[in-house]
Amino acid sequence: MPPVDMAHVTLRIGDRIILSDVGLTVPAGAFVGMLGPNGAGKSSLIRAILGVVPAAAGRISVFGRPVGRGNHDIGYLPQFPARSAPRLDGRSFIAAALHGERWGLPCDWRPGRHRRHDAMEIDRVLDLVGAMHLARRPIDHLSGGERQRLLLAQALLGRPRLLLLDEPLASLDPHRAREVVALVDTIRRQLGIAVLFSTHDLNPLLGVMDQVLYVGRGAARLGTVDEVVTGPVLSALYGMPVEVIRANGRIFVVADGVVQS
């Protein structure tokens, strides 16, 4: 079964239609970059896959099952993570999520219960993201890139088969952004999982993502970069003339005279 399958899906926030009659399938093990103008509904789509935002119409399934809250097959890195105690160290930060304070995991922890298993699971995800050296460091002493590693470690708790990453590159400099993308791709290949990676700039994902999902004006288009990131396709999604410029190994999307990515 595919990680995500959508058929005739309409998403509505209040009176606003975010997506209308959308159908798409995320292939197993794929790295899919999700892009679109601000307010296009990228975060809403991720939340719909999580089962937080119900579809007004149509069907969304994850690995062949209807979406629902607390799906252990999904690891989620939110765009705006909840604030944590500033003196919390890296290990305790991940432990808080393991104990039910992360979306997708049941709050079923009691002091001392499964303590050895918990420690092994925390070590496993710290090692996966290359953050063992951050285990005892206070999170308020960490850089943005280091915090993202810990958030990614949280998302990997419970061995999910699908990662939903909502703007994980926000506020990172280009070097750190490339590091995060490379890390996510390495983990994807190592674990054989699928990744849906929301971002405002597709360039750090070039050469890594298998497909791009562009969202705009209630529609969505999934395909390869060459299929989707074209003037005609993006003009239809933006509802205005869009120019796609390729230069020096980078892609620039220009809409209404403003560079979008």
Image (cartoon, rainbow, N blue to C red):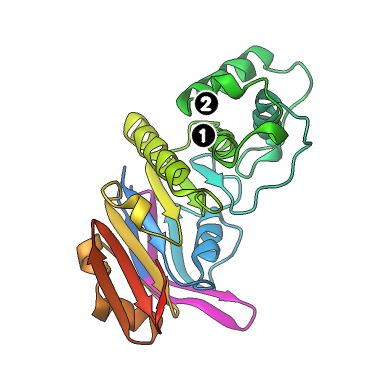
Q: Chief secondary structure of the magenta span?
A: strand
User: Quick check: 181 above or below 206?
Assistant: above
| Dot placed on the residue nearer the N-terminal end, 2 or 1 | 2
Q: Which residue is mark 2?
A: 125
The image position of residue 32, as x and y in percent, is: 35, 53
Helix, strand or loop at disc 1?
Answer: loop
Residue 58 visible, this orientation:
yes
Residue furthest to the bottom in view is 240
- Residue type marked 1: Leu
Could you classify mark 1 by the number of other residues whose Cα lies within 10 Å: few (under 14), some (14-19), or many (20 or more)? Answer: many
The image position of residue 125, as x and y in percent, is: 52, 26
What's the mark number on residue 156?
A: 1
Q: Quadrant of residue 35?
A: bottom left
Judging depth in this view, the residue of 131 and 49 nearest the camera is 131
Could you classify mark 2 by the number of other residues whose Cα lies within 10 Å: few (under 14), some (14-19), or many (20 or more)? Answer: many
- Boundaries of the magenta span: 3-22
Left or right: residue 165 compared with residue 114: left
The image position of residue 177, as x and y in percent, is: 45, 46
